[in-house]
Image: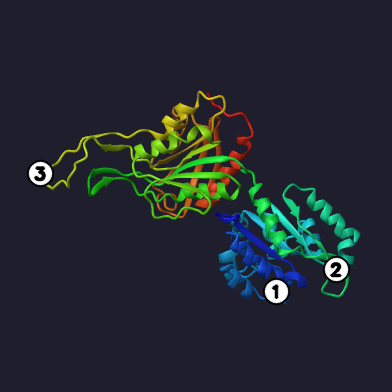
Amino acid sequence: MTEPLSGRNIAVAVGGGIAAYKACDLVRELRRAGAEVRVAMTKGACEFITPLTMQNLSGHPVFTDTFDSAQDQHYGHLTLAKWADLFVIAPATADLLARIKGGLGNDAVTTTLLAFRGPVLLAPAMNTAMWEHAETQANVTALLAQPKYRMVGPASGPLADGDVGMGRLAELKDIVQATVTLAVSGPLAGKRVLITAGPTREALDPVRFISNPSTGKMGLAVAEVARAQGAIVTVVLGPVETPAPKGVEVVRVTTADEMLAAVMSRVESVDVFVAAAAVSDWKAEQVSAVKEKKGDGPQTITFVRTPDVLATASAKVHGNPKRPLLVGFAAETNDVEAYAKGKLEKKRLDLIVANDVSKAGAGFGTDTNSVIVFDRAGEALRSTGTKREVAKDLWGLLHPRLHSTHGVG
């Protein structure tokens, strides 16, 4: 059974209260549920538990100081904010709630939250009098009025200082369940997404083939982000060594014909089709049954076109009353904009993601990319960063389009 948080990147922010020690078990439980977890701590939190403890439990360095140059290399506030799909603040102390509500950015936690655009789960914990104070209640009310914030707890019972009343940190199982609920209610919750990724290979003989250097990293990043935002994701994946993200269905293929068959049997039942694969354009007209021996002179191989997976899928769904959004990729080395726009029109797509693969950091096999996304009205988005960051920007562009009428003629 798939863990409920598989494929999710969750940042845990720890406030400076006695309940901070419970955040250690929270990190452990979130990882058991399949999440990748990274931690940010206020200076107050560091008085209760050490960052080293959280580093050992999360498996990653902990962000505690925005002015520490060594930490900034790992966790500059923008880096953690872009990495995370969801923030859990536990414990959310009265002081931390007030600073978040006020829009302050004076420590590792609040600075990161100012740069974070995703959902935030608040798990308050404090003395009963502090919880019932009018200012605390006003802060909580103001935060929950914003769509990005949700809250779990606080619970009622004995407190660390001997009082009894409202203010206990919610039970860990309740925080984990609230995290799962928030994760699966993301902007793509329930949407079905089909993605192609990686290269295809076309055999010449039993030991030789033609292909390209694609590693599938961009397409798999698109799949990972879609899964993290609640989508039901299927990846039709060519022969790559890059591991597929957790929680997605993977259909392994080798040739363009196999990829076409896998796509055509699924494309009419999805909400979005993203064709990120680098499909080989040519295959041998005749494939030798035995290894071809090299001769002394030139040898000739006759090539024929492979099927155009995206164009064929587009043609199939365009007559449907409700069709998926169609997103293509154009990896070019020259005249990038012109070629990309040509493919957008010819294949009747909603969006096309164009990049110059001859540029450093934007080609095959890299962990980064630099793209321009075009829609039928012109340029829609420029994005540069890790492939996961580019994928998040792409999905951000797609979200509102999923709630409008599909179809571009």
Q: Which mark is residue 127?
A: 2
Front label number (1 vs 2): 2
Q: Which mark is residue 270?
A: none
Residue 178 image position (x, y, % from top left)? 70, 55
Q: Which mark is residue 297?
A: 3
With 53 as the anchor, is 222 left or right in this view? left
Mark 1 vs mark 3: which is more N-terminal?
1
In the foreground, 371 or 352 = 352
Furthest residue in direction front, as rendered = 1
Mark 1 vs mark 2: which is more N-terminal?
1
Q: Which residue is mark 1?
A: 46
Measured along the vertical axis of the image, is residue 46 above or below residue 144? Answer: below
Rounded to the nearest angstrom, the CA distance separating label 1 from label 3 is: 73 Å
Task: Tell me the quarter of the image containing the N terminus.
Answer: bottom right
Circle 2 sits in a helix, a strand or a loop, which is it?
loop
**Residue 55 appears in the picture as rendered:** yes
Dividing the picture into quadrants, the one containing residue 113 is bottom right
In the foreground, 375 or 132 = 132
Report the amino acid beneath label 2. Asn
Report the amino acid beneath label 1. Cys
Crowd rating for badge 2 (residues with CA inside 10 Å; few <14, some 14–19, many 20+): many
Rounded to the nearest angstrom, the CA distance separating label 2 from label 3 is: 87 Å
Rounded to the nearest angstrom, the CA distance separating label 1 from label 2 is: 19 Å
Report the amino acid beneath label 3. Gly
Residue 164 image position (x, y, % from top left)? 88, 69
Residue depicted at x 54% and y 43% = 382
Dividing the picture into quadrants, the one containing residue 309 is top left
Residue 92 image position (x, y, % from top left)? 76, 63
